[in-house]
Amino acid sequence: MKILLITSLLFVSSFGFALSPQPAESQKDAVVYHNATLHIGNGKVLKNATIAFENGKITQVGYFKMAWKKSDIDLKGQHVYPGFILPITNLGLNEVGAIKATKDDVETGSMNANVRAIVAYNTDSEVTPTLKFNGVLLAQITPKGGLVSGLSSVVQLDAWNWEDALISSDDAVHVNWPSSQKYAFDFSTFTVKLKENKEYAKQIEEIKTLFKDAKASLHKQNGQVNIKLDAVTPVFTGSRAVYIHASSPKSIVESINFFKSMGVKNLVLVSEQAMEPVIGFIKQSGVPVIVESAHTLPDQSDRSVDSGYTIAVKLHQAGILTGLAYNSGMMMKARNLGFAVGTLVAYGLEKNEALKLITSNTAEILGIDAAYGTLEVGKSATLFVSKGDALDMRGNTLTAAYIDGRKLELKGRQQELNQRFLKKYNLK
């Protein structure tokens, strides 16, 4: 009986491994691609060019007269992109929304500055491979909930554990700045309506008190430990950012003004259509922005039907450093990040300018642009190869992907099931 049980467990284990890609090994041999269309990530494109990388770093990009080796690869016009970067996501923190035991993205309480999302990050998430197969190779793992949600971290999406995944630890404190009005369900009419937020003044004061106390604690030498204040104090030296999540024009203006008055050196605004009326103010403030999603409906009845799609375009065209997240509905939809950027092309952005919103722009906002975000010599070989346009679901078919030069296994549960049923119905 014991032998039968052990055999069964081994079978289940091996079947699981077959469906979930294992982390790749470190790069051993140099990789050289010729005749590729290189989308650098900073707005430039090089056609029929060469890219080479070794020991996880890009060593050559451009046009070279060089003797081909047997190991060199002719891409014949395929496309190479820097790995897409997904900011503001609960990837690896929330596996199944209906199962409480798999949800680690929201902590109890409202003031959780000390909560570290990275220690709850699950590298074995079944959702992560679906993002990698569409070119999303980096992500900012972010807690949610409360007035101060906690600390995010930036990770690469091919690792055995969170320590191996980590790129930038505890990069930002996330603040949910309240609005004077909030949406509430009206049971008398079964509709959602805007109602006064009676806790508004109290909530604002709680946030302000936390940051004022943290700033004051910089000058105290009493030896006492306060983990909430200790999580906030780095924002006053610039070593940690404050991400302001705001949902109304008024909250955008008052939150930025408050943190500027407190001397916070590194601010990032996270919002959606509420930014449109105050684009001029945001531009003047110099604060970069992350648009939470492009694929959304109008948030007010008097807004244009395409306002969700155009806000990122307007911000970018105004000269504001803009990144794009994908927080529409279920977290697993974030695999469509590249296609969301492709949609923006239809609303006025040139394709390689649009690409910057999930590559170089986002890397700069997250503070990882020294190593990621573009295909440049000396940077990490975190990139992927697609047969066609990676911003168009009709053309995006990955043939290879690399994180720090490590070649990823592009086969997971979905691919396994696809092959199984193609075989069952003799379709291949």
Image: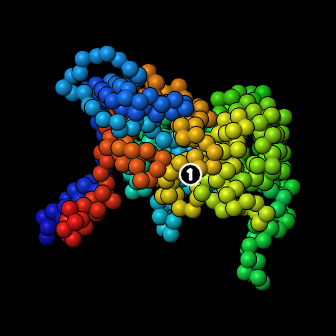
Residue found 48% across the figure and 31% down from its top: 45
> Mark 1 sits on what residue?
343
Residue drawn at 36 percent across, 32 percent down: 36
x then y, percent, for residue 85: 51, 41
Q: Nearer the viewer, residue 361 or 122?
A: 361
Q: Which quarter of the figure has residue 136?
A: top left
Label 1: how many Cα within 10 Å (few below 14, some 14–19, many 20+) = some
Please state if 112 lies on the left or on the right of 193 as rendered.
left
Determine whether the residue tagged by mark 1 lies in a helix, strand or loop.
Answer: helix
**Quadrant in which residue 257 is drawn:** top right
Q: How is the image coloured?
A: rainbow
Q: Nearer the viewer, residue 407 or 306?
A: 306
Q: In the rendered image of this protein, does residue 411 appear above or below residue 75?
A: below
The amino acid on which the numbered mark 1 sits, given as a three-letter code, is Thr
Tell me the quadrant of the picture where the C terminus can be found: bottom left
- Where is residue 390? Give x, y as percent: 44, 45
Q: From the top left corner, tell me how far across and down residue 296 is, in percent.
A: 63, 59
Which quadrant holds the N terminus?
Answer: bottom left
